[in-house]
Amino acid sequence: MDEKSLIEMGFKDGQVIFVSVSAVRPARKADGHGPASYRLAPQIDKLPMMLLLNEPHFENLFNLLQQLSNLNLSNMNLNSQEHFGLKSKAKILSRNVWELLMVIPTNLRILNGLENAANEPESGDFSQFFKPCSPHKLMYCLQVVEHLSDQSIMNRKPIAHHGEGDSSTTQSDEPSPEFQQMWHQKFISQGGLKHLFEIFMSGSLQLKDTDEWNEWNQECLAYLLRLLSRFAVEDKENASDEAKQSEAKPANRQRSDKCLIPKLKKTILDTMVIENVLKILMSIASDAAIPSCSLSLHSGSWGRAEVVHFALAFLVSAAYSRPDVQPVFCSLPNLATWLKTLVLDAPEPNVRQEACQGFYRLCLGQAPDGTTGYAFLFPILKSLLLYLNTAQGMKSTHKQNGDNMPFKDSYGAGCMDYFWLVCRLVEAIKTEEQGQNTEEESQIDLNELASCVGEYIKKKGYVETRHNSVEDDSLIGLLHLMVAILKHNTAFKCSTDGQALLEDVCECLFALPNRVQRHLPKCKTPTSRMAAIDLLVELAKGSISNYVLLHGKIMKQHSKEVHSPYPWDYWPHEDIRSDCGYVGLTNLGATCYMATCMQHLYMIPQARQSVLQARCSLNDYQGTLLELQKMFAYLQESERKAYNPSSFCKVYTMDKQPLNTGEQKDMTEFFTDLISKLEDMSFDLKELVKSLFCGVLTNNVVSLDCPHVSRTIEEFYTVRCQVADMKNIYESLDEVTVKDTLEGDNMYTCSKCQKKVRAEKRACFKKLPQILCFNTMRYTFNMVTMMKEKVNTHFSFPLSLNVSGYVEKNLMKMNRGEEEDKVTEDPEMDTDDECYEYDLIGVTVHTGTADGGHYYSFIRDRLNQSENGQDKWYLFNDSEVKQFDAGQLAQECYGGEMTSKTYDSMTDKFMDFSFEKTNSAYMLFYERCKPGNKPNSSPVQPDKSDKDIVAKQSEEQIGDQPRLKFQLTEDLADWIWQDNMHFLQDKNIFEHTYFGFMWQMCAYLPTTLSKNEEDRKKIHLLSAKLITSFVLETLIHAKEKPTMLQWIELLTKQLNQYQEAGEWFLNMMTEDDWWPQEILIKCPNQIIRQMFQHLLIQVITQLKPRHVHLYHHPLTSLASSESGELQPIDPMEIGNESCVTRFIKKMLAILNSGVRANSKNLSEYFMFLYEFAKQGQEECLFLLQISTITAMIQFYMGQNTQDYIEVLSDDEDDDVITLTEDKFRSASLEKMITLIAKLVECSRTDRQLNLSDSDQACLIGGKGLPFLYNQIKDDINLKQTCNLIFSLTRWNDELAVNIITMVFSGISRNGSDYSQREPFFKLLSLLVEFAGGPPGLPTFTQYVMQHFWQVAEYCSQQCLEWISQQVTRNKLIHMWILNHMDTWVESYLLAQSNPRVRSAAAQLLIALVPSNNFRQAYRNSRSIASPMKEIHLSNEALIIMHQIYGHLLNLLSRAKDYADISLYGFNHLLSYFGLMTFCLLGRNEKLMFQPYFKDLWDMFQPRLSEPPIPTNHNKQSLLIFWYQVCIDCPENIKLITQNMHIAKNIAFNYILADHEDQEVILFNRCMLPPYYGILRMCCQYSRQFTRILAQHQNMQWAFKNVLPYPVHYMSAVDELFKLMKLMVVVHSDSSDDEQQAIELFKKRTLKLFLEQLDAQNSWQAFVMSLKILITTDQDRLQLIFNGGLPKISDALFTLSMTYHEATACHVTSDIVDLLNILILVLKIARCFKEQNLLTYFCLLWLRYMKL
């Protein structure tokens, strides 16, 4: 790396490199030379940069600079281009030399010389350093001077010497501040400043008449002026930061209005001759503004702008230092021309900016002593206004730099800075001091100037465009200038001309384009529109007439009559046409194939023209062609981003079916189908398709053994190209036209010779189309996986394709006279003069897999080329269209693999990760080149310049082709431009700039108008109307509305401030309910609905004091009858005298206006009515008078329903209830119920409801109370429904009974759907749980319980679950259920066939026990085998629990009937026995079981024990209960052992030992432990029972089939071993018969184990059984005789393997026990070794051990 440059190593400029110093470097091969970094460092004085400081090298560098900058090429015979190239190269070289000077350390001779010249008076000769004849050396010395001076004075860091390296080699420390201050003062006192001023006055660095101004002279002059401005001004130690910043060029265009100007020092003022200084300064500024070649190379860091900046800075300081400067400057004859040169004509934007800033500071600055430059304002302003006409006629000089980049000023004259300066000067005019400046101000008539500017604005042309527009600087400047003029409140503002200007500006902003005047409006860019808006605001400010005029124009834009309804969350700027000028197609789901195909067809100019001009000749395709024309017209003329092709998909058919927008299709198939349909539409389109896409392919068979040739012709539209195993399209075309030899068994039969001959078969292109389409066969079928797959391999194609090698005339050399079948040649197929060069014009890319993906296209635009003559490429991706770099085609379209870097944390390295690209070209479109046209051979580079909408050009020419006319029919043009007008109007309105303008119109401008109270009310009403229309009609529909809350607050304030505004608001919505329906009903945004609802309530609240007394008027009127009595009038007339009540009536009428479709949004609607009712009793009475309850119930119920259901009642059995038409289950109707409940309660007087007949009929009328039934069923605000029922049933028990009947009828008649019955149970809970309340409420609990069990027959589970909840809350229900257990427990706990009902019944019994711990323990219990025994119950709870438990025990006698498996199944008694088991809390409960033992045994034997059922869960639950009731209760054990019948038969229990069936295993795992536990407890209590049980065959079966499986039945095996231990126990008082029985049991059991037990797998059971059974020597001998030694060996082997392999320490005790048993056995064998039989078994064991 040391021997290579950074560029060679791949480093880039600005790249950040991390270097590891401690990294180990690999060893190099020993070649005798080490790297340069290994060598010794050279001496300092031998370094190259130190050598350059020595003479003559240092001086030669300046000489080289001089030669390069003054390069004379006049004697050389060069053309302009060569001359320009050499000049540019010389500039670059000179800049490189200067950079070299900046890198090396400062020359010590110059540095020390300048220091000494300032410090030593005798050596104070500065002429040897400051030589004007050498600008490079002069600039070098000036930089050294700046370095030595106090740099803290300058805020601007020197630019030109950023690489200077003084301190690194010459000085170790920076000079001290004292030294710097001393040197600065000494430099001035020694005449250094005077010398610099003399150089400036000499003019040696200025532009010469004969030469071009050298850029080195410019920079040197700028640096000289910089130091003069620094040294010549007074010290600024106490100056502000603004004064310090005034020396440097401002960084942006935001100039400060207050500029502090430093004054010049007296020493420099005394030497100045004002006339001469002004002449030189103006000359310098003029020279800097002289236009130069815009193509010239500027390589320096300083330029003309810096010259102007420091020249004007010096001029301004001089003007503020000497009062005689102003008259001299203002009396200059060429002042106006000089100003024009700097401000308007200067081609460099920076020069114009610096000039305007300088003049701004000259006129509006201020010196530290308070001196101002106001005296310069009018002369300069007057001179500038002389060129106003010139400025307003200038074109813009800035353009966009790339896509969506900020505007950048370009080279050339411009007016933007001119208008900025004029506007600032006009704004600064002090109108209150006109008496002091009458002479000057008389020369500037602001009214006349306003009229002039207004005329210019009116006559200004249309420069800006809607897309990629260049800002019209002159128009923007005129608008800003008019704003500045009108700020002085001129008479022009309120004049007729001012109103005319306001109308013109409105036209500039809001005029809509049409098919004829497409250039409207005049202001299209954001900047110009903002300027126009500012002008409108200024025109309306303080002028009532102008405000009224503007108000009328703006109001029209926010009326629903002038636009179609806006969608919600609307923002047109997201849907605007792409900047590149093309329109996309919306993807309707899976229509990307259609979008890409249509874009390709549209981008072919001939196809576009023919489709737009076609007339269909077949009715079958007339609709398709019309939709295709509409699509093309939209793509050409629309201002929107994309076209929705849904209408085209409806009429277009493939395979006789309309296009399914959700189904993916192949793009090639659709393209072929489309052009086939185009052929059938008309003759012109058929000719188009034939000429563009149709080619001819010939299949030739050339005989090798005879002179005959066979040829067949076929047409093609697309060429299929193989991709698999192909590198590029040429290889694929070779595959298409490959020669195939027919020989051997595959020989060709010549039809003429009638014999088999050898032949060559080949396909050739006979005729090629204008547009050659290729279909890359990216999809293949894998015969192994039988699936469709995509080929993603690399496949390239060129931008220019030559297909001459694949046409017939080049491939086939044949004699036409000898052809077998003579084919009539088509003249069109003559390809002699045909061009075979094709240019790529489009690519369709597919990304994804063979099963699905996405299509998008890259298409070349041939109608609009870039400035360099190349075509542009665009990416068409559904609705997105943007410019594309053709150089990226290979990366985007060729497919293949992609490599990326992936960090590997294991190796701590970045690894290359390759994967296949899923995006690759699927279709290629090539267009034939015209003869003589050179095809593109390199990727097209898109141009970045601004263009207007390319598709809007009506006539285009392609190469030598005639002009194409893309003219639309009248109908299509009107259709598309009508849409464009609406869209552009929406675009102008839905933008933040316009929103800000409306805020000023509504909030700011009314405060600037008349203070007269009458006018204020008028303006306020206008403002309220405008803000209401804007907010409710426009703003709430916008997607981007960050200030929505502020707008609503302002709107509320406007409507509440004056009651007239609120009355207008309500009256308007009463006349037209558009806003209430759109906002309160149809708006999907709940926040907006809530805002509108709150707004309505606030307005009504504000109007209440004035209108509340009118709510009920007129109530009555005098009738014209003879009796003269007061007759009631029509209820429709109630409330018509108040806008509030009229609006409420209108809102109620909305319910009948088809709001059902938006019923989910009605929450705020009913909330509004409810909030209105909450305002007071008057409001409620008004709502009752206008039958609000009736209207809402009729809306909810509907009047056209035809469905009915039966509802049972006490009186009749044929009552019916109408069902609602729609299911209103949403929360939107909750407030409706709340409102009805409130109105019903408000209608009460004493004990009676004063409801109208219609209200009462709707509420409680009809059979079965239909309203209450339906809204309960729909679960709408049941809490308020309960309140409504309370209000209706107070002092009305009969209605309460009917309601309860209706509720239970709804429960019983709603089928088995739990969700439909749940609301009724919720309501019952609310009714019975309500406590307290007003007097007169019925006892709903009593009514509910009277009907409860009747309903429980229909939905038992829900009823029991509901009543389980209520018994814990309602004592009355608890007492009633507990006292009536005889009526329901057996029915639901035993007789019910549904297990959930039985479980619910058990839960109800548990709930009756008043103990939360008891209830919670039952809910948490997962197994009935483990009851809760640590539950402490109170005396009351214990009594109730015993009552329940006793009742359950009483049911044992009847429970055996439900154990019949043929009728009730295997798990009918689970809940019953589980509940009784849970109630066994102690000994008392177990003793309560004794009287019912016989009932339990009768159920077990034989109903449960004998039937051969593998998994009888009834038996399991019974045994668990029996086991639990016997634990610690010998009294219950005694009942078993004392009954010999039971003792003999209890062992008879069918058990299935299927160790493979998991269900059986799980069942036995729960059933066997309690069963064997009962037997164990009996054996422990009775030795007789033990002897009987030991002899039972079922025990031997258990030892054989259960004991060997401890893993499956751990608890059961433990119980069996306990039984075994009890059976082998010999008591001291045991009789001989007992001992013989025990010995017999041991022999039989031991033999059973040794014969049946696998000691290797069941070693646990084997070891345990030996420990129990082998207790005597006789037992040990029996072990040997029965072959037990090999079994012990097997068990030992398994245990040793387990111990060593798994390190299972838990088997250690088993090994020890088994070894102890073996030792005792072997000992007894030794004792009886003389027995031959014993010896025989021992020998067998030894042999077994060896094997």
Image (cartoon, rainbow, N blue to C red):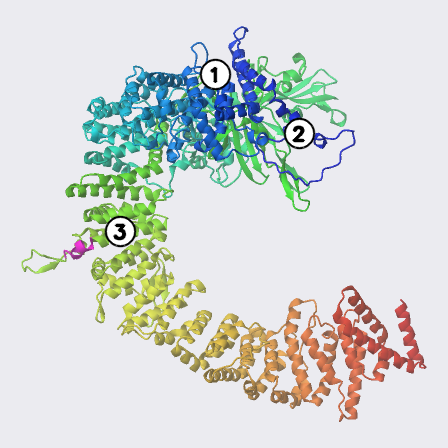
Nearer mark to the viewer, of 3 and 1: 1
Q: Amino acid at mark 1?
A: Pro
The magenta segment is 1103-1114
Of mark 3 and mark 1, the one earlier in the sequence is 1
Q: Secondary structure at mark 3?
A: helix
- Disc 2 target residue: 726
Q: Quadrant of residue 633?
A: top left
Q: Which kind of residue does numbered mark 2 sit on?
A: Met
Magenta-drawn stretch, dominant element (helix, strand or loop): helix
Structural crowding at the residue carrying mark 2, measured as other residues with C-alpha within 10 Å and reported as few (<14), some (14–19) or many (≥20): some
Residue underneath mark 3:
1096
Q: Is residue 851 left or right of residue 1695?
A: left
Instruction: Relative to 567, say whether 129 is above or below.
Output: above
Relative side of 1371 to 1031, left or right: right
Q: Which mark is residue 610?
A: none
Q: Residue tagged by mark 1?
A: 132
Spot occupied by residue 825 in the image (x, y as percentages of width and height): 59, 15
Q: Is residue 935 left or right of residue 1112?
A: right
Front residue of 833 and 1403 = 1403
- 1342 and 1734: which is toward the camera: 1734
Percent x, y of residue 978 = 34, 31
Q: CA distance from mark 1 to mark 2?
A: 72 Å
Dot 2: element: loop
Label 1 neighbourhood size at 10 Å, few (<14), some (14-19), many (20+)?
many
- Residue 1464 visible from this viewpoint: yes
Extreme left residue here? 1122
Q: How many marks?
A: 3
The residue type indicated by label 3 comes to Leu
Vertically, is 152 above or below 1261? above
